[in-house]
Every structure is written in C-alpha cells, then in structure tokens.
Image (cartoon, rainbow, N blue to C red):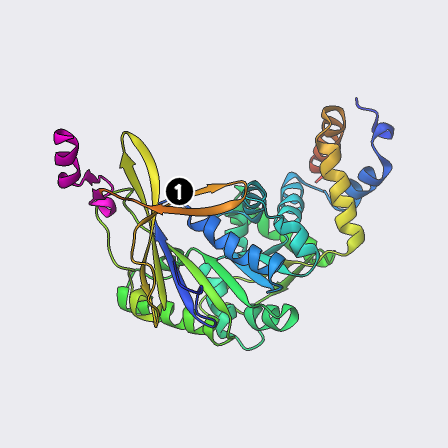
Amino acid sequence: MYDFDNIDPVVSEFVDEYVDSFITWDLVLFFYENPFTMGTPSSIAMSIGRLDSDVLPYLEKLVEKKVLSREEHVQDSAEAVYSYIPDKDFERRVEQFQKALKDRASRLMIVSKVLQKEAKK
Amino acid sequence: MLRGGLLPGSVGVLKGAPGTGKTSIGIEFVARGSAQYGDPGLIVTFEEFPRQLYRDALSIGFDLRALEGEGKLRTVFTTPKVLLEEIRRPGGLLDRVVEEMGVKRAFVDSITHLERITPDPRRLREIIYTFLNGLLRHDLTALVSQEDPFITGTMSVAEAGLSYIADTIIQLRYVEINSTMQKALLVLKHRASDHDKRIRQFSIGPGGVEVSSPFEGREGILSGNPREVVSRRVEQVFR
C-alpha cells in the first residue's frame, strides 16, 4: 500500500474533494489546459477520448461544484454547452495537482487513491 | 504584400494545404496585434487544442497564455455548431467577448469545419455567410483559415462562396524545388488595393512568419512543381 501521508496535503485534499474518477481527472486537466473551451458533452468526450454517456455525469458533478457552468441554448440539439468557470484557488490547486502527476511516486499514490474511490462506487 | 495590411473591419481567408502555415500566420496576426499594437484578440479553434496552440505560438515567439492572463487575448475551443449559435444569439459568446475585451482582431481555425454542420452546399454557403457577417457585425478584422485538400497540384478559389464574401484571399502553397519542399504565398485577392501580385517564398521560425523574395526564373509555381524559365536555361547553355 502507498503512504498517502506523503502526498502534498493540498493535492491530497484536492483529490478528495474533486477527483472521484479517472474521467473527472481527465476533465479537470482538460479544462485547465484549455480554459476557454465551450463544449457539448459529445465534443468534450471526443476531446478526452471517452464516451459521451460516461462523461456526462462527471460534467454535471463539476457544475455542482461550480468548476463548470452549463448553458442550454444550442437550438438544433438537446445538448448543453459547458464552460470552465474556476476561481483562482481552484486553478492554483489544479496547478499543484498537475505538478504532482509529473512525479512518479506522487502519481502512483494519486492513481491508487482514485482507484479506491472508483472501487467504492 | 497587402500594401497596408488587412482592411479594418474586413474578413480575410488564408487558404492552404495542411502544414502550409495557416495557423501560424493566423496566430501571429492576432498575437502581434495584441502584444504590439494593443488590439485585443480572439482565436477560435475547432480541432487543435488551445494547449497545442499555446505551444506552437511559443515556438514562433508569442506567449498566448501570458496575453490571456493580461486580458489581451482569448483562445476559445469549441465546435462549429456551438460557435454559430453563439454568434447568432444576442448576448452570446462573441457579443460578450467583444464587449468585455474590446476585441479588434480575430482568427478562426478553420472555417472548413463548418462543413460538419451540413453536407448541403447551399445551406453551407448560408451558414458561412451568416458566420462571417456575425464577425463583421462587431467591426473587427478577422482572418479565417480554409483547408485545401491537395498538397500540390489542383487549386481552387475559396469554396462555398467565400471568394465573394471575403475581402482578402491569401493562398499558401507547397512548392517542390530541387527535391526540397518550400512554401509559397500569394495574395489572390485584396479588395480596393493594388496588392503585390508576385508569388513569394516564406518561412516560419522563432521570430514568426518571414516573407522573402519572389520565386524568380521559375514558372508554374502554383502547380507545386515549377519549371525553370526556358530563356534562362538557354542563356546558361550559351554562357
């Protein structure tokens, strides 16, 4: 087992609070790296190489957490449009999360943590 | 070459095959305007992720993320359908960004992706017309890219009626000379201007796009496989 106490506490708290799945992981990094994205679930799913149906519930969770906004105005489509609306603190935490992922040991600990969360569902 | 640049409040089209430099020229147009001339800019990308554009822009000397941080530029990643709706909608993305930032220059990469909305050429033409007029409504100067399907050889005027709507059409081509691919740039159309009609070489490097001398002593440049002009070769034989 990994010693989660060795993860940067800011990163650990961030994972606890936001990263409950690998799809959320992908979404958080995708929006951080492409901050002015305005996408539908299908276009966002394509952008991160996932299925629309898998991505939608996690987009909604990020809307609940006020990381994304949702607008429904595409006339010819039932799809909503999601945009990134993070506050400065969230941005700073994603930056640290991204930095932690570059370190192999931290990355493995984060992967293990997310796997445990996925297993509990 | 344009004898004074793009016409303010107009739309120009950058045409070329993949890799000819459409995106780099478009990025430089917006980023240089933003960094050097105080013209806030908007880049809209449909396929390349902004993070790729940030990286590519750095390689030609422009830090888009820093400009975004200063509120001078925005790189929006979206779908053609969403953007079209946003342009049409009062208070939509374009209205908001133009009001918030006072956008003066825009680059849309690429208008070819509007074909994803409909396969019907007539409907596509209407969509492109609406799209470009939506940009012009804000009195900004816009460049849009359009992909040529062929690397060399066959060349067409801008498709889907773009040639009528656009005030400027710039054609980028690959040219094979002595077994090396070079890049050529030609202003096909520039309304109300006595623009440079010569086909010039250009390159893209750390300082951005550099347009250099015309291709001299060769003909058939736009075919992609130019020939040396015969009279010159004859002169060389008798020299």
The residue at 84%/34% (across/down) is A8
Instruction: Look at the image and tell me whether residue B54 can be seen.
Output: yes
The residue at 84%/25% (across/down) is A3
* Quadrant location of the C terminus of chain B in the rendered image: top left
* Quadrant location of the N terminus of chain B in the rendered image: bottom left
Q: Position of residue B47 (x, y in %)?
A: 47, 49
Residue B230 colored in magenta in the image: yes
Residue most toward the front? Answer: B239
Above or below, B197 against B166 in this view is above
Choose top left, top right, bottom left or bottom right for residue B202: top left
For disc 1, the marked residue is B19
Bounds of the magenta segment: B218-239
Instruction: Look at the image and tell me whether residue A116 can be seen.
Output: no
Which element type, helix, strand or loop, lies under badge 1? loop
Above or below, B200 against B141 in this view is above
Residue most toward the top? Answer: A1
